[in-house]
Image (spheres, helix red, strand yellow):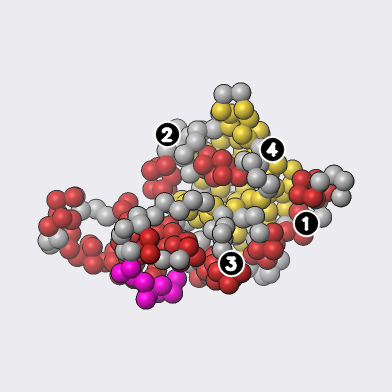
Amino acid sequence: MNAVITPAPAAAQDAPGGKQIGDVILDVKNISLRFGGVNALTDISFNVREHEIRAIIGPNGAGKSSMLNCINGVYTPSEGTITFRGKTFSHMNSRQVAEMGVARTFQNLALFKGMSVLDNIMSGRNLKIKSNLLLQALRIGPAEREEIAHREVVERIIDFLEIQAYRKTPVGQLPYGLQKRVDLGRALAMEPQVLLLDEPMAGMNVEEKQDMCRFVLDVNDEFGTTIVLIEHDMGVVMDISDRVVVLDYGKKIGDGTPEEVRNNPDVISAYLGTSH
């Protein structure tokens, strides 16, 4: 992992709703990603400021998930750099990204279906557990005290997500919307500075979407977590995002406030077709 120190970012600013937005915490510059002869991403640049909700939108196949995969180390960009808190990297692996404070949920749930809600969320504490496997298995001395402390954190997350009644239920027995909450809880258990959410409301009904919107806003407001969000529901994006970047066929076609993006002719064309 090679890193260089970059100059200090621009000063903090206020979001339209009065929320204090901090300095740039994540800066993506000239990212390109190729698979053989296929260009998944082409020269993408945008930044994310501390404490904001930054949405990435675009039609299917636009490269949104590929962009998140580059940020959290699943893919190695063919070109470009990613700067996190003043350190610039050409590539990081997923563990390094997690250790630096970036957590991720996935479009397709990857929960442990036979394990309880509590144990699934507890798995998000893995990087913070210091005891070795033997001491963890024996649950003696410092290992036991450490496990108790981690379980207290997990219980607070369960309370926050309002899933107390399901804490001992195997995740595979829960409705889809509640499984999405558990997935969010597991990411929150990492205590991330930046949370990457890949379509957290996909497949939900209206009521479930409203609940998830509330949790995302509360995570951003109460925990101060910076959020990068991929979402297809434009109503949700326009309601909860501070800024939006728009991709189409792996290229950036728009970037700005929700209102600016809503009125961008290139974005309108990408979503509605040029005939409109």
- Counting residues from the N terminus, which is met first, the one under dot 3 or under dot 4? 3
Q: Which residue is mark 1?
A: 262
Q: Which residue is mark 4?
A: 249
| Residues at discs 4 and 1 in contact (Cβ within 8 Å) | no
Q: Give the x, y percent position of residue 103.
A: 45, 52
Q: Amino acid at mark 4?
A: Tyr
Residue at mark 3 to residue at mark 2: CA–CA distance = 42 Å
- Counting residues from the N terminus, which is met first, the one under dot 3 or under dot 1? 3
Q: Nearer the viewer, mark 3 or mark 4?
A: 3
Q: Residue at x 60, y 52 (%)?
A: 230
Residue at mark 4 to residue at mark 1: CA–CA distance = 19 Å
Would residue 14 be visible to someone looking at this image? no
Say if 163 sits above or below 44 in the image. below
- Counting residues from the N terminus, which is met first, the one under dot 4 or under dot 1? 4
Residue at mark 3 to residue at mark 4: CA–CA distance = 28 Å
Residue at mark 1 to residue at mark 2: CA–CA distance = 38 Å
Q: Which residue is mark 3?
A: 205
Q: Amino acid at mark 2?
A: Met
Q: Secondary structure at mark 1?
A: helix
For label 1, the crowd category at 10 Å Cα-Cα, with few meaning under 14, some 14 to 19 and many 20 or more, is some
Q: Give the x, y percent position of residue 92.
A: 45, 37
Task: Please provide the residue range marked out in magenta.
Answer: 159-169
Q: Which residue is mark 2?
A: 1
Q: Nearer the viewer, mark 3 or mark 2?
A: 3
Q: Residue at x 56, y 28 (%)?
A: 35
Q: Secondary structure at mark 2?
A: loop
